[in-house]
Image (cartoon, coloured by chain):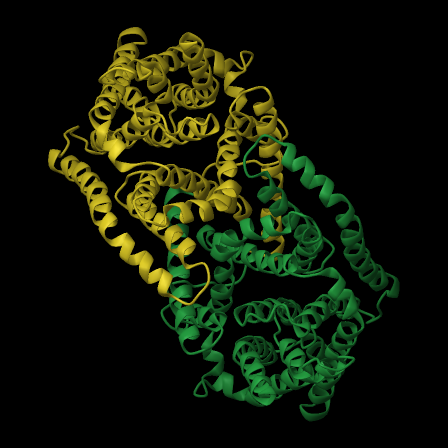
Chain colours: A yellow, B green
Amino acid sequence: MTPDQTTQAILYVIVVLIFAKLFGEFAERLKQPAVLGELIAGVILGGSVLGWIRINTGHSLPPQLAVLTFLAELGVILLLFEVGLDSDLEEFLRVGPSAFLVATIGVIGPFAAGYLVSSLVFHVSTIVSVFIGATLTATSVGITARTLSDLNQLHTKEAKIILGAAVIDDVLGLIILAVVSGMVSSSSGSISLWEIGKTALLAVVFLLSAIIIGIRITPFLLKVAKSLYTRGMITISAFLFCLALSWIAHEIRLATIVGAFAAGLILAKTEDQAHIRHRIEPVADIFIPIFFVMLGLSVNIAYFNPFNPEARSALGLTGTLILVAIVMKVISGLGVLGRGVKKLVVGVGMIPRGEVGLIFASLGLSRGIITVDEYAGIIAVIIVTTFITPPLLKAVFSFHRRNAA
Amino acid sequence: MTPDQTTQAILYVIVVLIFAKLFGEFAERLKQPAVLGELIAGVILGGSVLGWIRINTGHSLPPQLAVLTFLAELGVILLLFEVGLDSDLEEFLRVGPSAFLVATIGVIGPFAAGYLVSSLVFHVSTIVSVFIGATLTATSVGITARTLSDLNQLHTKEAKIILGAAVIDDVLGLIILAVVSGMVSSSSGSISLWEIGKTALLAVVFLLSAIIIGIRITPFLLKVAKSLYTRGMITISAFLFCLALSWIAHEIRLATIVGAFAAGLILAKTEDQAHIRHRIEPVADIFIPIFFVMLGLSVNIAYFNPFNPEARSALGLTGTLILVAIVMKVISGLGVLGRGVKKLVVGVGMIPRGEVGLIFASLGLSRGIITVDEYAGIIAVIIVTTFITPPLLKAVFSFHRRNAA
């Protein structure tokens, strides 16, 4: 990385943050969550509109853009870390059964509906239908967490259920990924149940042991940190703890943000919670918007251009998949047990899809299982569910507030 | 950048920060500035010892390492921004004449001595001697600023003179770079005085106008930032202002950190100084150590292995250059006007060399002007002056304290 590339990366950060704040502010003035503005800022900066920052996914990214990708990942890790820090583990355990049901319905529903629609309506082969169903399962919680934060609703019971369900959802997604990858890579189509069980078990063991052991040892670790001479030890220790759990989560094939969320939950139980929260906030303020602008950057609006023949030919399948993806997750809100919880909020909060769906789609495309049209359809699902969630969540909250009044 | 590369970059950050804090703590327990420990942490992680992180300078850096390079740059930018935020512009103007004299002596002295020693003692050609002299001129203020901060001496008059002189030194270094590059690239050896004058003028105009205009408009900008709805606007505005001035400084061929320092000085005059300082601190705490570990990482201790014939052959020149580099900057302390200022502290604070010397050396090597031996000698100057300054500054302060008692 030459000094010129470094300063170009600095320029990228400047432009991304200015656009993020400008459009975030617009969004808020229009009474929309700021995150919607940041997504749109990304679309505008990206290849479809201004073309100032072009990211073509792949290995050959110039170093300046690799830096942006990293800062974006750091941003979403810090977002979930903050959300964890603001949360109370007991409350999560209390909503555990609801979260489990919501996650399970929210995985089985889209899977079954995606499979049935693909095979019955669009007459694609069984394996492709299974594949399409699988891409619709995993919720990507970043956008919901951020929207709830923008709307000041992170402390509600609905938020706890959504976040808990998202963690369980990620473990379920891992199992499905193992099954589907197994189907793809083994020529016989048979899958080792033991391998799948091991993957899932590892994830569950990690989460449980991180929380159980973490809660016991972090007070001790922080005491050591405080006894040290050097400046800023608590901030750095907390930051390192968050990065370490994120890294481990990725190594066992969970999402990094699940690790970051667990790290936040654990440190929330320490007496330094308020201090850590306060010190991490400015770091998070700087890097979180970069993640959402980068999400917007990767949108190619050509997919939605009705005059683009490629987009039009896939329109039927794409539209159907988007509908299935939205409706089946909204239905998952019915998994909430007990009364006094806004089921519609929970269902809408589970709508966004993200990286996991993208991993499935890329896998399917590279193995020649799904066609370019089907791939475009899945990308469209991710884009639409991402952009629709902030205004939809906002509307659902307003609807409930009006009804209560 | 693949998700695996992103998480590997996360792992690098974890390892770098753990080593930084571990060795920084060791250094402090041995009553040395923490920064010395961070430099050593880098050497140990680097190719010469553990080899966990190998940086070969150049374009082909893998993206994970490009990320580390960027975070290091961000670290040193935040360091000088903090130093600027803690400073009072009037105090700088008051020590202006001293700073100017120190900078001038500190540029002319090493240049003349480097030239004379090379041509008279080592009998190298005139152009190479000029080149070697030029590489010894520019002080790199990062290490001194950090050491003064570690020693809680940033508020002393000595610190102001050093920082002021370092800014002037950077402008002078720019002029020398223009002269020497001109000598190198023009076959006739003639240089356009107009070009050089323009470069220098641009730097001075930038610094003056940034400060004069900056002080007038930042209160207004911050008022706008405060009127916005979105969270963390003051932190982000200050951060953006710092990045923007750093970027401009680089574009007009000054060091990024000169821009960052100016940004800090300007915001120090606003009523939000304390708030900004407080919010930037955790961000700085995280990224500053990465810079110093990366400095250590680039050290190849093979240069200092007396059993390495290549290192031995250059030993005479290398040793002499190191001596000249140290002695001539210490002498620059005599440029301090008036009484009550520890001239030795100022001189020692000006010792470290850094990127500018490296730019000269790389230019000379790539054009075939200097030999590999001479290049190694210049690298050795940078390494030794960097590592020697923290303990030396500490010792000089202790010496003065003992004398005063």
Quadrant into which the N terminus of chain A falls: bottom right
Q: Hey, which residue is sitting farthest right in the picture? A: B194
Q: Establish if A40 lies above or below A305.
A: below
Quadrant (top left/top right/bottom left/bottom right) for the C terminus of chain A: top left
Answer with left or right where residue B134 lies relative to residue A157: right
Residue A313 figure quarter: top left
Residue visible at 78% across and 46% down?
B216
| Residue drawn 46% across the image and 67% down it | B297
Position of residue B180 measured from the top left corner of the image (x, y, whole percent): 76, 70
Image spot of residue B347 (x, y percent)? 67, 80
Residue B343, position in %: x, y? 69, 82
In terms of image quadrants, where is residue A47? Answer: top right
Q: Residue furthest left?
A: A194
- Residue B237 vs residue A396: left or right? right
Percent position of residue A185, x then y: 23, 34
Q: Nearer the viewer, residue A118 or A348?
A: A348
Determine if residue A224 is in view: yes
Residue located at (37% from left, 25% from top): A353
| Position above or below: B348 against A74 | below
Numbered marks: total: 0
Q: Depth check: give the residue in front, A369 or B281.
A: B281
Closer-to-camera residue (B41/A98): A98
Q: Is residue A172 above or below residue A264?
A: above
Q: Residue furthest front?
A: B405
Task: Mark yes or no: residue A124 visible.
Answer: no
In-front residue for pair A99/A352: A99
